[in-house]
Image (cartoon, rainbow, N blue to C red):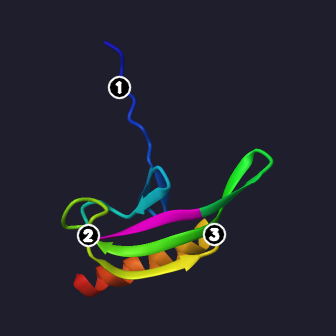
Amino acid sequence: MAAVKKKKLLTYKGKPLLRCGDRIYYGNLEDKFILALDIVESTDNKDIRSSTKIKVQLMDNTGELGKGQVYRKGERENLYKALDIGEWWLQDAIQMMG
């Protein structure tokens, strides 16, 4: 019987990143809050596509994924800046609840 390989998830600061089309979910799926990052605009530079406008939303994760109440939202000009502010929002929300 062939060994089953476990697929590694992409992570940022120890939390998983899951991409569904132009939406990226960041955070542990067991936590009360999750971050949703929507790619609004992107450009093509040679062979690389880079995001130029990202919508960031801190949302409730107790119901269906991506359908929760939005507690904070904003826009940033690239993925790094969006993850940076979003990760801070997520940590703050988790600490307030815990």
Side of 81 where 68 appears, left or right: left
Q: Quadrant of the N terminus?
A: top left
User: Could you tell me which residue is drawn at 38 percent across and 79 percent down?
Assistant: 91
Name the residue type under label 1: Val
Q: Residues within 10 Å of mark 2 (few under 14, many from 20)?
A: some
Which residue has dot 2 on it?
68
Q: Secondary structure at mark 1?
A: loop
Q: Secondary structure at mark 3?
A: loop
Name the residue type under label 2: Gly
| Marks 1 and 2 in Cβ contact (< 8 Å) | no
Q: Could you say where residue 32 lies in the image, as x and y percent from the top left?
A: 24, 71
Q: Secondary structure at mark 2?
A: loop
Nearer the N terminus, badge 3 or badge 1? 1
Which residue has dot 1 on it?
4
Measure the alpha-carbon separation of dots 3 and 2. 24 Å
Nearer the N terminus, badge 3 or badge 2? 2
Side of 22 where 47 appears, left or right: right
User: Could you tell me which residue is drawn at 22 percent across and 59 percent down?
Assistant: 64
Q: Which mark is drawn over residue 78?
A: 3
Name the residue type under label 3: Asn
Question: For the magenta stretch, what is the residue range?
Answer: 33-40
